[in-house]
Each structure stands twice: as C-alpha cells, then as structure tokens.
C-alpha cells in the first residue's frame, strides 16, 4: 500500500485524495484536449494548513507537485508530465471570500475562488474587480495570479499583477508565508509578492490573495466598428485614447475571418452590418460620470472616425443585452476556432505602433510556406497583444499541418523577435514554450531565473518541466 498516499488521506481526508483513473481524468487533460498527463493522485486540500501539510509530505517522499486552479491554462502549465510520479494539487475546494473591506477597497480571497464569483461579489457591493477574460466562469484567482493573466481590461486596469496587494503562499518547504497585507505602499525589502505572480506554480503555491476593488462605473458602453485595415484600427485607438482617456476600458481587434468562424459555428452570433469588412474593433467606455456623458463621448468619437473614413461602419450597443451580444462574438472566437478543428495559437505582443507591419510581414511569410493558410488574428490591440492564431489551409489535412507546428512557431516567433516583442504576452510559458524561450531570452535572464528557482525550490518539486 502506498504509504505516501495513506499519509495524504490522513492529512486531508480520504475522499479528497483521488486515485481512480476516471475521476482523475479531467484534471490530467489540458483545456484544448491536446495533451494528457499522468499523476499518482489528485489532492484536493480544503485549507492553507492542509496545503502546507501535503507539501511537507511531498517533500519527504520526493513527489513533484502540479498546482491547479481552473485548468483553463493554454500553455500546458496546469497538467502534470508523463512520469506518473507527480500529484495534481487542486485548489478547487479553497473558494472562500475571506474578507471585503469597502473603505480599503480590497477583497481577501482563497486562491480557488472562481473569477466570475469574485466579479459578482464586487458588483454586489457597488464595486468592480476589473479582471475579465473568456475563461472567467471557470478560471481561479490563484491561476490568474500564477499566470499574471491579462484579458480585456488591461489597457485601463493592468494585468492581474497590478490588481494584487498581498499574497499567502505555501513554500516548497511547506511553510506558510502570510503576506496578506492590503497596503498600497510597503517598501520593506524584496517584493516577494511579485516573485510569485506569473511564476506559474514553479516557486510555491498561492493559497490566498488580497485584491484591489475599484469604483463601479456609472455607465459602460460598447461599440463595434468596421474598417479596412489594422492601421485604421490603430488610428481609431489613438483617437479613442485622445478623446476618451481613462474611460477607454476595452479595445479588441477581430479580423473578418474570426467573425466568419463565429457565425459559422454560432449562427446567432454575427456582426450587425449589411456587408463584411476586413477588420473590426470592439471598444468599451466605462464612465464614472453618467450615461449621457459616456454616450456623448462615444458618439463624437464614432462620428468623427466615420467622417474622416478611418472606419466605414459602426454600431453602438443600445442595451446591456446588445452589448453582451457584441462581446459574445468576441468571446466565442476561441471556441469557434476549436470547433473548426486543430489550430496553432500564438499569444504575442509587439510595440503597438508596429502591429500593422508585424501582421502584414508575418502573414506574407506564412502564406508563402502554407498557401491558403487561414489567419485567425484577434486580441487586445490596446496592449499590443495579438492572438495570432492559424488554422490549416482548407485543402491541407489538419494532421499534416500540425506536424509542421514547430516550423510555424519558428516563423511567427522569429518575426516577433525582429519586432522586439514577446512570444508570450499573457498566457505564460508552461511546458509549451519552455524550450522556445531559450532562443529569445538572454543568457543573463535565464541564469537569474534559474538562480531564483534553485534558491526557492532546490528540490525542483514545484511544477517540474514548466517555465524553465
Ligand atoms: P490553471 O490553468 O489551473 O493553471 C495555470 C497555471 O497556474 C499552471 O502553471 C498552474 O500550475 C498554476 N497555478 C494554478 N493555480 C495555482 C496556485 N493557486 N498557486 C500556484 N500556481 C497555480 N488568459 C489570459 O491571460 N487572457 C485571456 O484573455 C484569456 N482568455 C482565455 C479564454 C479561454 C476561452 C480560455 C480557455 C483561456 C483563456 N486564457 C486567457 C487562459 C487562462 O484562462 C488563464 O491563463 C487563467 O489565468 C488560468 O487560470 P486557471 O485557474 O484556469 O489556472
Ligand atoms: C482571448 C484566448 C486564447 C486564444 O480570448 O483573449 O487569450 O488564443 C485569448 O484563443
Ligand atoms: Zn487574450
């Protein structure tokens, strides 16, 4: 009998130690269902003390740990390797909102809280927690912090890193670091909090966080604009920033093919225009003044852009339902591309001013090698972050195309590098980009990251095979 697992059962209760293959299955396969890892068990602790006890047992037994939140990650960071030695440590049971302080404008939460539940708890108290992404119904705040998730509100509120004031972490030695301070200023030594944010579970397990709350906007307006080129989209971004300033809280680019895919797989979701256009921008204003003030700003922006022919058409959502319908189109691109079949994703960022050139140049390079390749280009234009995804040419068997994934990645990521960009803007490296990053990060950066990893996790039990 496996003594290690017996000790885990003693620590957290037998019912929270899952070893049955069928019951483990959903924890071992990644969201895109491309990869299935192996584990000796899935452990589901219910408290920070139980997490710490499990880590100490893993250290004693030399068992690697794969921390997992909602398992919506897209870079194979949240599923274990094929050794079968690891355990998946799921934070799913730790989903309590511990405290809400409306004067400090902070919320203290368990790491396993689902993002949508945090958004709702803030909303119920006339506050906003502005992290928003397509997976918000199942991703957890612990995963958001571990991947430093971006989403659609970054251009106004920043990444998850900017939304966090304090952390509680179980270290690879099984100690609990309680850094749950809600201070906006604390200059007392190295910034441990920022070390764990974005570490993708390779330095410790986040069990709690203090996150910032913001005033809930008085009015949120959404518009969909249609234009001929990405350069026109960038021109609209500049106009929106000049005219709307900090009220601009969303600016998402979508190419025509993205909308074709969504309409094909979700026929009720289509752009409300009489004809297709090469590019679209979904933009959102969030105003603390009034609906009238926001509408005046938005109408002036749209009218001006139409008059100078920066855009060719536009619709302003007249209701919450219409705004939701426009956002549904945007949030269904990932699902529609998955419904279309196997595809290759690139989550890249380049300087905003270079995005048009990057797309033109890289599209041409790929079309040269893969005639008929289908570009599914969309994303957070306001952050310089594109989801530069590709689907196989219609006449090419998907498996043949996927065989050449490394060649596609090399073309795209070399192009990103030439444009001084990043090969992972918001999803992290996980296991998927661990090797590739060596081509683009300096030896000094790689050495320093290795020194930190060796210092904090000398046994390398924390999420082995990810990031480094
Ligand atoms: P998981 O997938 O469970 O884990 C992610 C990583 O964090 C893994 O390395 C895991 O080991 C580690 N981890 C998880 N919890 C902890 C913890 N408590 N302590 C330490 N390490 C931990 N991402 C974006 O940034 N922006 C987007 O717009 C976006 N849109 C998406 C849309 C869809 C439809 C999908 C499926 C995904 C999208 N993602 C996006 C990716 C994903 O949702 C994010 O990376 C999210 O932050 C992952 O959260 P999670 O709880 O699912 O983490
Ligand atoms: C988004 C999802 C990932 C992808 O929706 O913003 O992060 O490339 C992406 O489909
Ligand atoms: Zn994204």
Image: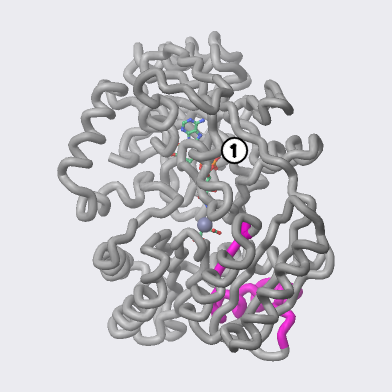
Residue 265, percent from left and from top:
65, 73
Left/right placement of residue 111 relative to residue 189 reads right
In the figure, 211 relative to 349: above or below? above
Q: Which residue is mark 1?
A: 140
Q: Measuring 34% from the left and 57% from the top, which residue is drawn there?
A: 423
Q: Is residue 250 magenta?
A: yes
Label 1 CB-ligand 1 distance < 8 A: yes
Q: Is residue 367 magenta?
A: no
Can residue 450 be seen here? The reply is yes
Left/right placement of residue 99 relative to residue 196 reads right
Left/right placement of residue 266 relative to residue 380 reads right
Q: Measuring 21% from the left and 29% from the top, which residue is drawn there?
A: 451
Please state which of residues 4 and 1 is positioned toward the viewer in this rendering. Answer: 4
Q: Secondary structure at mark 1?
A: loop
Q: Magenta segment range?
A: 248-273
For label 1, the crowd category at 10 Å Cα-Cα, with few meaning under 14, some 14 to 19 and many 20 or more, is many
Residue 317, percent from left and from top:
78, 70
Q: Measuring 40% from the left and 69% from the top, which residue is drawn there?
A: 353
Q: Quadrant of the N terminus?
A: top left
Can residue 22 be seen here? The reply is no
């Amino acid at each position: 009998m496996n003594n290690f697992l017996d000790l885990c059962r003693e620590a957290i209760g037998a019912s929270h130690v899952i070893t049955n293959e069928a019951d483990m299955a959903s924890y071992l396969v990644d969201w895109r269902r491309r990869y299935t890892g192996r584990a000796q068990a899935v452990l589901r602790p219910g408290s920070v003390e139980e997490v710490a006890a499990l880590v100490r047992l893993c250290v004693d037994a030399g068992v690697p740990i794969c921390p997992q939140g909602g398992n919506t990650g897209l870079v194979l960071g949240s599923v274990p390797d094929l050794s079968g030695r690891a355990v998946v440590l799921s934070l799913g049971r730790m989903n309590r909102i511990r405290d809400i302080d409306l004067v400090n404008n902070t919320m203290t939460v368990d790491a396993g809280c689902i993002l949508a539940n945090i958004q709702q708890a803030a909303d119920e108290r006339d506050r906003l927690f502005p992290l928003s992404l397509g997976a918000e119904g199942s991703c957890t705040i612990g995963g958001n912090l571990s991947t430093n998730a971006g989403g659609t509100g970054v251009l106004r509120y920043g990444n998850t890193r900017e939304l966090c004031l304090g952390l509680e972490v179980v270290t690879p030695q099984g100690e609990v670091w309680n850094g749950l301070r809600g201070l906006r200023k604390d200059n007392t030594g190295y910034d441990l909090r920022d070390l764990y944010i974005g570490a993708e579970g390779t330095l410790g397990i986040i069990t709690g966080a203090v996150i910032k709350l913001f005033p809930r906007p008085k009015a949120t307006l959404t518009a969909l604009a249609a234009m001929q080129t990405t350069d026109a989209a960038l021109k609209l971004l500049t106009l929106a920033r000049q005219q709307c300033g900090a009220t601009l809280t969303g600016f998402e680019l979508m190419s025509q093919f993205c909308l074709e895919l969504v309409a094909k797989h979700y026929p009720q979701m289509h752009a409300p225009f009489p004809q297709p256009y090469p590019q679209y921008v979904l933009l959102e204003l969030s105003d603390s003044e009034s609906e009238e003030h926001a509408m005046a700003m938005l109408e002036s922006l749209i009218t001006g852009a139409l008059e100078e022919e920066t855009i060719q058409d536009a619709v302003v959502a007249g209701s919450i339902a219409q705004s939701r319908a426009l956002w549904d189109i945007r949030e269904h691109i990932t699902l529609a591309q998955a419904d279309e079949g196997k595809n290759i994703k690139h989550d890249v960022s380049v300087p905003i001013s270079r995005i048009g050139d990057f797309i033109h140049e890289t599209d041409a390079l790929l079309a040269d090698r893969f005639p008929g390749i289908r570009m599914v280009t969309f994303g957070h234009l306001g952050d310089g972050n594109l989801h530069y995804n590709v689907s196989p040419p219609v006449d090419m068997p998907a498996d043949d195309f996927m065989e050449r994934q490394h060649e596609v990645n090399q073309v795209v990521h070399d192009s990103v590098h030439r444009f001084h960009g990043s090969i992972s803007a918001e999803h992290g490296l996980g296991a998927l980009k661990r090797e590739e990053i060596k081509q683009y990060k300096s030896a000094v950066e790689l050495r320093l990251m290795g020194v930190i990893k060796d210092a904090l996790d000398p046994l390398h039990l924390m999420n082995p095979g990810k990031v480094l």
